[in-house]
Image (cartoon, rainbow, N blue to C red):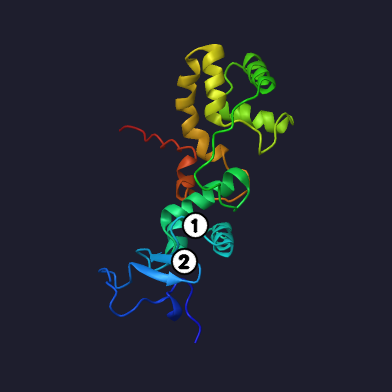
């Protein structure tokens, strides 16, 4: 009989003398890839190693079908934070591949790109940092691997134009969630429920006074 997805296979179960937490699952298990641990949902993971690619594919596939991250987390027995991180990375880069272990340094602007940033800002003083980033990609001055981060662009603008950009960044955060999606995952973070409230409110008819 095949094991259910996310369950602890028999070969990975610990010895009878091993302590169990209140959830009924072992705290640590031995796997062919090394010493693993069991999360609160009963899924097995290896600390310090990325989630397998087939599970990452499944997370993105389920999101494409409109399944909310919290439901994906329960069905695949992967932590909600891990699901959200994979989906956010897919939104930003279009890739499900894990990032480099130990993190990555933010991409900074080269002198030529800094000149373009300054040029865009002078042409349109109301332009936000994320809009400049999109423009750099659209005009072909950068690609996905070389385009500077929004924070790096904001830093350039603060140096060139003063503190006004800091005020613009506060407004940018409100629109960032909608503008950031590049790969057509509608409702990937569960924003579908907000859509009906965006319509215009109809004025109530005035009743004649008697």
Neighbourhood count class around disc 1 (C-alpha, 10 Å): few under 14, some 14–19, many 20 upward: few
Q: Position of residue 21 (x, y in %)?
A: 27, 68
Specify whether residue 188 is in view.
no
Q: Residue furthest bottom?
A: 1
Secondary-structure class at tag 2: strand
Judged by depth in the image, the label closer to the viewer, 2 or 1, is 2
Q: Position of residue 76 (x, y in %)?
A: 47, 66
Q: Residue at x 59, y 16 (%)?
A: 125
Specify whether residue 185 is in view.
yes
Lateral position of residue 202 relative to residue 180, left or right: left
Instruction: Say if 158 sits above or below 205 in the image.
Output: above
Lateral position of residue 72 relative to residue 16, left or right: right
Neighbourhood count class around disc 2 (C-alpha, 10 Å): few under 14, some 14–19, many 20 upward: few
On the rendered image, what quadrant is the C terminus found in? top left
Disc 2 marks which residue?
34
Q: Residue at x 34, y 78 (%)?
A: 15
Q: Nearer the viewer, residue 19 or 67?
A: 19
Q: Position of residue 107 (x, y in %)?
A: 59, 32
Q: Residue furthest left?
A: 22
Q: Residue at x 50, y 67 (%)?
A: 33
The residues tagged by marks 2 and 1 sit, at their Cα atoms, a distance apart of 10 Å
Instruction: Say if 117 sits above or below 36 in the image.
Output: above
Disc 1 marks which residue?
49
Instruction: Say if 125 sits above or below 202 in the image.
Output: above
Secondary-structure class at tag 1: loop
Q: Are marks 2 and 1 in contact (CB under 8 Å)?
A: yes
Q: Residue furthest right?
A: 140
Occupied quadrant, residue 52: bottom right
- Numbered label attached to residue 20: none
Which mark is first along the chain, 1 or 2? Answer: 2
Lateral position of residue 64 relative to residue 6, left or right: right
């Amino acid at each position: 009989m095949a094991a259910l997805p996310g369950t602890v296979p028999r070969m990975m179960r610990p010895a009878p003398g091993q302590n169990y937490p209140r959830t009924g699952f072992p705290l640590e298990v031995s796997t062919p890839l090394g010493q693993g641990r069991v999360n609160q949902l009963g899924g097995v993971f290896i600390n310090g190693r990325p989630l397998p690619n087939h599970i990452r594919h499944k997370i993105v596939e389920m999101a494409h079908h409109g399944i909310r991250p919290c439901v994906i987390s329960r069905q695949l027995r992967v932590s909600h934070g891990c699901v959200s991180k994979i989906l956010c990375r897919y939104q930003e880069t279009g890739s499900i591949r894990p990032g480099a272990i130990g993190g990555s340094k933010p991409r900074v602007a080269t002198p030529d790109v800094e000149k373009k940033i300054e040029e865009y800002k002078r042409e349109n003083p109301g332009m936000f940092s994320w809009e400049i980033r999109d423009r750099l990609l659209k005009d072909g001055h950068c690609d996905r691997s070389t385009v500077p981060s929004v924070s790096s662009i904001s830093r350039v603008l603060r140096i060139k134009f003063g503190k006004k950009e800091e005020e613009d960044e506060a407004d940018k955060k409100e629109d960032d969630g909608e503008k950031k999606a590049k790969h057509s995952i509608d409702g990937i973070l569960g924003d579908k429920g907000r859509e009906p409230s965006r319509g215009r409110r109809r004025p109530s008819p005035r009743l004649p006074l008697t």
